[in-house]
Image: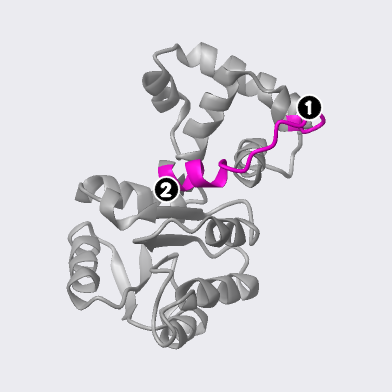
Amino acid sequence: MRVVLAEDHFLLRDGITRLLQAFGHEVTAAVDNGPALLRALTTPATTPDIAIVDVRLPPDFTDDGLRAAVTARARTPALPILLLSQYVEPLYAKELLATGSTGVGYILKERVSNGADFIRTIERVAAGGTAMDPEVISKLLTRKTHDQADPMSRLTPREREVLECLAQGRSNAGTAETLFISEKAVAKHISNIFPKLGLPPSDTDNRRVLAVLAYLNH
């Protein structure tokens, strides 16, 4: 897997680079600022399978990393992006999600405590999956509405819990283990969620991802 890494702290950038290489992945570029990130993401020689991006990069230390990633994803819509941040920024998460329904993630640096788990998260996003930190999800839901006309209000508490697990990137088996229910029950909850959110069967759309995005945007 080819990776572009954007992180302004040298020790962290070097550490992640070494970790990726230890697991057999190629770091095509490791940069420390927004303009260099955009160049790396749009230059054929360094075009990656995934970009791991710190939101706040030089020169402005605001949302330079996100801006570069969103711009690159507009040019290459299928480019997977994993935001790795010290801060929970719901607006940034929503902006990333608005670029597409696959290959997106937002995790907090302080949550990364196991190298193998971090690599699995990166690989999941690179494969088109999602990985959203629970705290990011919680912040996104702080303004949730109780309007009965809102499709999300049709979900039962258990169905919401299932969707939250899916938003964190868990499989049916992982969701079942987290909620202490059977995989069959998880599958049943998911099949009930789709029509409640107005997601009919489709050969072109991934209803699982669309349901997660509806949940996060809510």
Query: Looking at the image, which residue is at 45% across and 31% down?
Result: 171
Residue, disc 1: 148
Upstream in the sequence, badge 1 or badge 2? 2
Query: How many numbered marks are there?
Result: 2
Q: Secondary structure at mark 1?
A: loop
Q: Secondary structure at mark 2?
A: helix
Rendering colour mode: one colour
Graded by Cα atoms within 10 Å as few (under 14), some (14 to 19) or many (20 or more), the crowding at tag 2 reads some
Residue 157, image x and y in percent?
Answer: 58, 19
Residue 124, image x and y in percent?
Answer: 42, 48
Query: Looking at the image, which residue is at 42% across and 41% down?
Result: 134
Residue, disc 2: 124
Nearest the eye: 190 or 91: 91
As for residue 55 lying within the magenta part, the answer is no
> Which image quarter holds the C terminus?
top right
Nearest the eye: 42 or 218: 218
Nearest the eye: 119 or 106: 106
As for residue 144 lying within the magenta part, the answer is yes
Which quadrant holds residue 82?
bottom left
Image height check: is 122 above or below 63?
above
Query: Looking at the image, which residue is at 51% across and 39% down?
Result: 167
Image height check: is 87 above or below 31?
above
Query: Looking at the image, which residue is at 48% across and 78% down?
Result: 64
The magenta segment: 135-151
